[in-house]
Structures are given as structure tokens and as C-alpha cells.
Amino acid sequence: MSDIRVLVVEDEPIAAAAHAAYIERLDGFTLAGTAPDGQSALRLLTDFAAAGNPVELVLLDMNLPDLHGLDIARRMRAAGLFADIIAITAVRELNIVRSAVATGVVQYLIKPFTYATFADKLASYRLFREQLAGPRTGKPGAGASQSDVDQAFASLRAPSEVSLPKGLSVSTLESVKDFIERQSGAVSASEVMAALGMSRVTARRYLEYLADAGTVSRAARYGTPGRPENEYRWNRPPAAARP
Amino acid sequence: MSDIRVLVVEDEPIAAAAHAAYIERLDGFTLAGTAPDGQSALRLLTDFAAAGNPVELVLLDMNLPDLHGLDIARRMRAAGLFADIIAITAVRELNIVRSAVATGVVQYLIKPFTYATFADKLASYRLFREQLAGPRTGKPGAGASQSDVDQAFASLRAPSEVSLPKGLSVSTLESVKDFIERQSGAVSASEVMAALGMSRVTARRYLEYLADAGTVSRAARYGTPGRPENEYRWNRPPAAARP
DNA sequence: ACCCTTGCGTTCATATTGGTCATGGAAGGT
DNA sequence: ACCTTCCATGACCAATATGAACGCAAGGGT
């Protein structure tokens, strides 16, 4: 099977270059081009399709200078462009997700994401494509059964598995991240311990990991007797993906 | 949450009546109308949307006298109609599935199907909608994390009893599901083991499958020494009214 | 200025559970 | 009656939060 042709749509040059580099690093994918805004993206897609060399997958940023990503998706469908779309966005609005799904968005990436997450999403998409191409070897083009379709859908929508350092669990990390994000100001390790019902050591270890990852920032808190306490504050996510 | 309004598009009167009856039998869904062909379906959708009472889900037969289902989906998107689509077809062509996904088809049913399959697909769609409405309690529109989106997508896929993974039996799964549903709070794998008289490995495997399918949610239980224990909670918010 | 108090950072060993592999036994087909 | 298939089980190893112990850096009293 030939490679899947990908178009990167991203207005920020740094992020666009990063995504393009990601694509070329991956096996089974080929970069068809990049576009900085919606109009040029639609023009590129139309040109490629007219040349008989259509783009099959679009990495689509939702926030573009001229058009919203959902508008681009809608115009693509109206123009008969059936490329699949992986949405990339920094706005974490859940109500957009449903509209995105309705316009044929197959994956949804929230910035900032790591390369592992990115690769995982694209790998699951490739698996989805492969399962649709030939679900069963003994059935030469006979047709698909319900379970074949189910399996293809399942591989497309399987949750990602991120690799964490030893000693940390995914669910605990999610709890801690969720708690810090809800707080308006900074939190200390003891406050996390009390709020989540975990031990001080555990809370501190996860906070330290998040500080190393850059998700939270760390500062000392003075003024109280005793050894100064570290306080952690949620960082606004940067616009670019972190590798 | 109010019911999900459904439009049935099917040219065969018998099948249309059957699907309509299915919808009305299901909890959480309301039949908005039926249409025998593509033109009337589009007109109905437009009228409902103009009346401020839009259809949220379309059961769309692929083979209609005037238009193909994919054409209807394409025109819907072009007209700005963002209703989700569950495709129903007798033609088992896999290459259509990809185009269907690109136009926002969330589920794919192959005729003939049983009522159980039908109900299962719609139940997973409803769970998807609920998770997008409020992914986590106590988070008033703060935003979604990557895992929230992943979980919503995961609930949309269909790993139901139609395609059980190897190593699981239907009867055991029913026992486990019944037990968890009866519990008010969360249960651990060990409690399921003790209550149902099965081994810990078996209990854990079924709980893990249910968590993966989105039927139950998984969380860590802290406070006790030793490795944290996973607790599983039935994932149904029917009476849990969120302020 | 010195020392004591205070509370957190840090480092282990420990207690449990999660995850995996190979085995046993039962059900159904031939 | 034999064989295949399939699911539950038991035992193993790996993983992860906890608790105690120790050290450290500030504040406050003398």
C-alpha cells in the first residue's frame, strides 16, 4: 500500500514546521504540502484533487486567521473533497468536538501534545485505513461484515496510551492535573494531598513531574514558620507543540 | 438532558416503520419524523432547523431512490446541517465506509441487524453525547483534556457483545454488569471477586473490558498502603442532575 | 547572635494490588 | 469416543502508593 498523503494546515510557521517534520518522521505517511490559512488550504486540496493526486488526510488547526477549522471542513465537504481530518486545537471546548465529528473529523488533538501522542493518533488512523482496505484475507472483495466495520471503528477510536516514567500512573496524574487546573492560584503539595486524599509523598512526586514537564511552574512560599513550601501554578499552554 | 431527536430516512415502508418503532422503544431518544427519500429528508431537516427544533441524529439508509446516502450527507454539511448520522446499508462495500466517516457518519449498521445490535449502537452514541456534555463533575465548562476527548471517542466505538474479545463469555459479563449496576458506589476488583465467587484475574479482566468499553469508569483508590486499588463505577448519569 | 522550633523535602523499605503466562477442565463439534 | 476450542484459574513477577526516618531551611524566642 502506498503512503498516505497528508496536508498540514497551520498558521504558525514554527508549529507548521514541527508538524511537517513529525509527518516525515512517521512510516507510511508522506507530506503533500503545508498551508498557512484556510483559503490556500482549500485551493491546495482542490488542485491536488484535480491533478488526480488527492490528499487523503488533513492535519487541520482550528484557529486560523481567515476561517475557522469547522468552516474549512464544511467547505471541503461541500466541494466534494473527502479527505479525512485530524483536528488540532488549543481551545479546549467540548461542544466543538461534536460539530467536528459531524463534519468528519476522525481524531482530535489538543495542544500541547507530545510526539508520542501525535504518533499514536496517526498510527491508529493508519490501522483504520488498513482494516478497511482488506479486513479478511480469505474473502476477496466479498464484502464486510458488521464486526469488520466495528473493528475498524474501534481501532480508529481507541484511546491513546502515553508512556509515563516509572512509578507514575495515568489516572493519578490526571487527578492531579485536573485539580491544579481548577485552582485559580497556586497550590502546595500539602493542599493536593488533603484535597485528593493521597499521601504527601505521592502528591509531591506528581507535582515534581508536572513541573519538569513544564505543565506547572514552581515557586517557593515564604512567611510561615517551618521550611519554605513549594507552590505549583498551572501554566498557560504554549501555542506550539512540545516534542 | 432532553431526548435526542432522531429522523429516520428509509424508502421501504416496512423497514422505516420498524426503525421508528425501535427508536420509540429506546430510552433517551425521540422520533422527530420519517422520510422516504433524500429530497424530503433534506427538506425536513431544513424545516426543523429553521423552526429552532433541529434534528440531532439521522438514521440514514444508503440506498434511496433519488439520492445516495453519501450525497445526502454531503448536502447536509454543505447546508450547514450538523446532525450526526448513523448509516444503515445492505451493500457491504468497505470503500464506502471511509467516505462515510469523512462526511461525519458516527456509526455504521449493516442490514440485516438485530434489535440488540441496533440498541447497542444507539446506546453508545448516547453515551458519547453525555460525555461531551459534561465530562467531569465539578468542572463547569473549564475545558477538556486530551483524555476526556479520548474517552468520548472510545465510548463511540462499538466493542459490544457483537464482537467480544477472546477470553470473555457473555454470561459472565452479564453477571459482572448486573453486580456493578446494583452497587450504589464504586467497587474494586477484589470485591467483585468475593461477591461473585470468581477469581481475581477473571473479575479484573471483565472490569477492564467494561472500562474500555466505557460502560464503567475507572479510578484509583488511595489512602491504604500498598499498590493503589482500582475502583470501578457504573457509568450512567440518568438521575444525577448537574447544577 | 545563637539556638530551638517547625514543617517540608527526600529517601528508603514495605504492603498490597495489577498484569501475564501457562495450565486445567468443560463444552461442543466431528 | 476423541479432538478442538474456549474460558476460568493459580502462580508468578512487576508496579505503585504509603509510612517512617532523616535532613534541611526558614522563623521566632532568648
Image: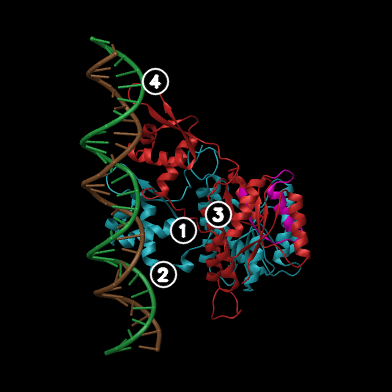
Chain colours: A red, B cyan, C brown, D green
The residue tagged 3 is A118
Q: Chain of mark 2?
A: B
Question: Quadrant location of the N terminus of chain B?
Answer: top right
Q: Give the mark, 3 or 4, whose residue is nearer the N terminus.
A: 3
Q: Give how far apart the Cα atoms at labels 2 and 4 are.
A: 60 Å
The residue tagged 2 is B166
Q: How many marks?
A: 4
The residue tagged 1 is B213
Residue A223 numbered mark, or none: 4
The answer to whether mark 1 and mark 2 are in CB contact below 8 A is no
The three-letter code of the residue at mark 1 reads: Ala
The three-letter code of the residue at mark 3 reads: Phe
Local SS, label 3: helix
Q: Chain of mark 4?
A: A
The answer to whether mark 3 and mark 4 are in CB contact below 8 A is no
Q: Give the mark, 1 or 2, whose residue is nearer the N terminus.
A: 2
Which sits in the foreground, A124 or A139? A124
Label 1 Cα crowd, 10 Å radius (few <14 / some 14-19 / many 20+): many
Q: Considering only vertical position in the picture, is B150 above or below B159?
A: above
Which sits in the foreground, A220 or B69? A220
Q: Give how far apart the Cα atoms at labels 3 and 2 are.
A: 29 Å
Tell me if I can see residue B127 in this picture: no
Residue A106 numbered mark, or none: none
Horizontal side, residue A101 vs residue A74: left or right:
left
Q: Quadrant of residue D18?
A: top left
